[in-house]
Image (spheres, rainbow, N blue to C red):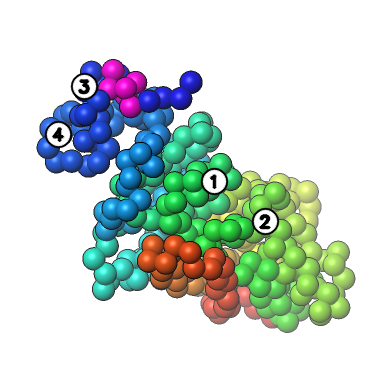
Amino acid sequence: MKVTILDVAREANVSKSTVSLVLNNSKAVKLETQYKVREAIKKLNYTPNLAARELTTSRTHTLGIVFLTSNHFKKAYAFDSVAETLLYDTSNGIYTGLKNTDYALLTERFSSVSNPDALPSLIMNRRIDGVFLIGGLFTSDLIEHLRQINLPTVIIGLQYNGTDSIFSEMEQVGYLACKELLEKHHKRILFLNGPANSSNSQKKLSGMQRAFSEYNVDPKGLYVVNSGYTGLDGYKSLKEIWESGLRPDAIFGASDGITSGAMRFLFDQKVNIPEDLSLIGYESSILSEYSPVKLTVIDAHKEKMGEEACRALLKRIEKPRSNTVWLGIPPTLSHGSSVIER
């Protein structure tokens, strides 16, 4: 049975009008009462009837960032968590894009792993004029809900049909990394990739395979392992390969987290980079910048992605019927000292 505003009022032991005031961000309600009402909304997973509230014609001059993560109850910097460098770097670009506007920005880390039907509170309470979705852990149900309530949305880091999307050209990411290693005459390249069912993972692999084909190199020289994106995932994946007897002469990590985990394993094995093994990372973030060896990386230009996403969302708010934006940001190779010629 659909939860109503009356159910929320009963749960919070307040009147229906008080719940309505809270939903409309009224300052006339005491903070303690606001808290009770919002807790009741969360508990009951209540979704306001936005059409009835006619909020689509009003502006809050506030935008939201929803970072979708499976690490909601873990520290973002833990070795077994996905490093939230995508959130940090793209957010910087969004802030840059908002400099000369009167928009404020709210951020929410959100996980739907335990409850796929849950909604971020920024969206559920309609406190924002538009939202940036960062990260790939969203469902089609979430996107469809945003469409139903006409909330302007831009996805950062992934393509989605019919929704404004700003992303790195993932096929080119894999191609550039593999091209660099092949030109340096590496013969046994290990690709520590993300999850096999991820479209981004599949595109990176496709790019590496294209490089092997263009350089007429035996594809048997490309070894692929799929895992999650945490440092621990990178560590365990390389450990498994290492214990199987394979000794690659180069590794490409599909994220800075995976690459950092691989570096820790190599350190434990007393393998020197790049003398014994070349290493390329992807993303370019605080992790690659602070590594003991200056990493060669494929730079996704995440701040640029944030700026372009900001431009797209502001346009969507002003012109709701404009054409869908699908913008791929070309990655570039940033040379460090972690790759040498063999």
User: Which labelled disc corresponds to residue 29?
Assistant: 4
Q: Is residue 187 left or right of residue 239?
A: right
Q: Is residue 25 left or right of residue 303?
A: left
Q: Amino acid at mark 4?
A: Val
Q: Earlier in the sequence, mark 1 or mark 2?
A: 1
Give the label, 1 or 2, closer to the camera: 1
Magenta-drawn stretch contains 8: yes
Q: Amino acid at mark 2?
A: Ser
Spatial CA span between label 3 and label 1: 32 Å
Q: Who's the residue at 57% across and 68% down the image? A: 326
Spatial CA span between label 2 and label 4: 46 Å
Q: Who's the residue at 53% across and 34% down the image? A: 116
Q: Earlier in the sequence, mark 2 or mark 4?
A: 4
Dividing the picture into quadrants, the one containing residue 338 is bottom right
Q: Is residue 329 left or right of residue 104?
A: right
Q: Who's the residue at 44% across and 38% down the image? A: 119
Closer to the camera in the image, 99 or 292: 99
- Please tell me how crowded label 1 is: few (under 14), some (14-19), or many (20+) other residues with Cα within 10 Å: few
Q: Secondary structure at mark 1?
A: helix
Q: Are marks 4 and 1 in contact (CB under 8 Å)?
A: no
- Please tell me how crowded label 3 is: few (under 14), some (14-19), or many (20+) other residues with Cα within 10 Å: some
Looking at the rendering, the stretch of residues picked out in magenta corresponds to 5-10
Give the label, 2 or 4, closer to the camera: 4
Q: Earlier in the sequence, mark 3 or mark 1?
A: 3
User: Which labelled disc corresponds to residue 144?
Assistant: 1
Q: Secondary structure at mark 4?
A: loop
Closer to the camera in the image, 325 or 342: 325
